[in-house]
Amino acid sequence: MSLKTKRNTQKILVHVILIIFSIIMLVPFIWMMLTAFKSVGEATSVNPFVIFPSEWKTDAFTAVWKNMNFFLLYKNTLLLIFWRVVCACLTATMAGYAFGRLQFKGKNFMFSLVLFQMMIPGQLFIIPQYIMVSGMKMTNSIFALVFPGLVTAFGTFLLKQAYMSLPKDLEEAARLDGCNIFQTFLRIMAPLTKSSMIALGIFTAVFAYKDLMWPLVVNTSAAKMPLSAALATMQGQYSSNYPQLMAASLIACVPMIVLYLIFQKQFIEGIATSGGKL
């Protein structure tokens, strides 16, 4: 076997494996779509060969759209995503610059606390955060949803690494031109970490969109629930209407699909630059 033939065989094998895994990843989404058009009997059938609905019905979509105020849920979810992204990028880029470029007393100890927070499961912070929000009389509000995302340990670490990768000559040149620390940060250093901030914004938006436990804990009012919490309330204790649940889930996917189509280029560049994965 020639070298060229061997390389072509390896390339074909890699593509086949990637296609298989791509199909496997799409199976849950396809199953959700098919279930949304089934009857309750077909959705709960134990027959593994009942894949496609015998009759394509839209009753589930009509019912959930009538019973759930999706415009309000979309609004709450988008506000949650917007403010968490703004707060995360703002606080993380300032903290990252301080930890990455400045020298001050207690710097290493403070950054070790940031790393320590990354190693602790986020569920442990729910009770202290709830006590804080409740003490401020801010439960059942958009602020309560945004509160855990005001600062981000992951974002601080990500931006710190981005600032550390920049050459020191930039700061020295800015200092010679008469820039103070704030001007150097705002005009010179921050614009050079744009790709890392985009990556952080993407991660924050995805995490905020699928956040479930905190919205259920801090909000009892249906008027302030995001999509994830509203979908969770459709799950019954003894039985569930799976076609309606899948139809509502499919409708809930629309905002993220639209955002991805609009910001597809930035999404791919941000993930590629950060080297991370969702």
Image (spheres, helix red, strand yellow):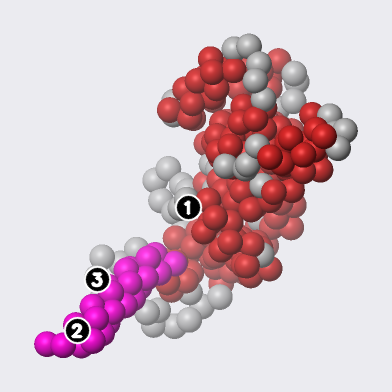
Q: Secondary structure at mark 3?
A: loop
Residue 103, position as x, y percentages in the image: 65, 20
Q: State how far apart marks 1 and 3 are (Cα).
A: 39 Å
Q: Secondary structure at mark 2?
A: helix
Q: Nearer the viewer, mark 1 or mark 3?
A: 1
Q: Secondary structure at mark 1?
A: loop
Residue 146, position as x, y percentages in the image: 68, 36
Residue that label 3 marks: 48
Q: Is residue 17 magenta?
A: yes
Q: Nearer the viewer, mark 1 or mark 2?
A: 2
Type of the residue with mark 3: Pro
Residue that label 2 marks: 3
**99 sits to left or right of 36:** right
Residue plotted at (43% across, 28% down): 119
Residue plotted at (41% across, 51% down): 239
Please state which of residues 230 and 152 is positioned toward the viewer in this rendering: 152
Residue that label 1 marks: 275
Residue 42 in which image quadrant: bottom left
